[in-house]
Image (cartoon, rainbow, N blue to C red):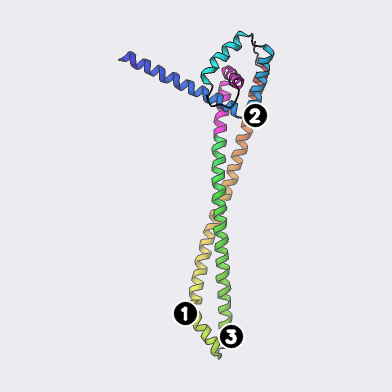
Amino acid sequence: MPCVSVVMLGMTTHSENLMRVQEELWYLIHDEDAKNILEVIIQKMNETGDGSERIKQWRDEAQSFISSDTKYDEKYWVAAYILHLSTTTKETIQEFINIKQEISSLKNELSELEEEIEEMECEIEELESDLEHKEYKLSIIHYDIYYGDEDSEEETEELEDYEDSEDPEVLEIEIKELDDVLGTMESNLGYLYYKRNDMWDQLCELQYKREKLLANLKEIGEHLVVS
């Protein structure tokens, strides 16, 4: 039984390693900037010719990692595999993948945050409109109360209507509540703006790191000897 366990563990480890390498190659091929680096290696492969035993060996080894549903030519997978084999690129490639994943995740968060901001801005706009309407009604009521003709039967009836359906005190309470809600929402919106700016700063920093890593990979790719 112990031997079976060792064999099973070895198979699992082999499968995990295969998937990890395939993921690395996939990221290199599907990133447009990284793909430009692979094209440098492909050019070197073409210059060397198909007679190179090393290229034949790498091409054979790369077959294990080529995805069946890939839209990219085999030569890109082979070039990515060659770049992966370079001892000086292993950590750089992994860091590049990690940063690429972080950028993708951050962009998704930013997209969700933009939607949240847009929804809150619409809510605030509606509340401000409602508040403006209530304040206008209250001003009309106060005007009628203080400057209207108190002896006018018509005005008296209007005041009775106000007392029934638009009590000034009720309006004042509603206005106060709206002011409080708006104050809280505007404060929350301000925080979202701050959060968005902070995330944009993070994104710019990650993209700068990505460019540096790509520059390192490009330099290695340009000096990679295929013979």
Q: Classify mark 1: helix, strand or loop.
A: helix
Q: Position of residue 120 (x, y in %)?
A: 54, 55
Residue 32 part of the magenta segment: no
Residue beneath the point at 63% across and 9% down: 52
* Residues at circles 2 and 3 in contact by the CB criterion of under 8 Å: no
Report the Cα–Cα distance between label 2 and label 3: 75 Å
> Disc 1 marks which amino acid?
Asp
Q: Classify mark 3: helix, strand or loop.
A: loop
Question: Is 112 placed above or below 152 here?
Answer: above
Residue beneath the point at 56% across and 79% down: 142
Which callout, 2 or 3, points at the residue further toward the start of the chain?
2
The answer to which image quadrant residue 71 occupies is top right
Question: Is 43 placed above or below 98 here?
Answer: above
Where's the N terminus, which quadrant?
top left
> Disc 3 marks which amino acid?
Gly
Q: Which residue is mark 1?
A: 164
Q: Which residue is mark 2?
A: 33
Q: Which residue is mark 3?
A: 148
**Dot 1, crowdedness within 10 Å: few (<14), some or many (≥20)?**
few
Report the Cα–Cα distance between label 1 and label 3: 18 Å
Q: Nearer the viewer, residue 177 or 14?
A: 14
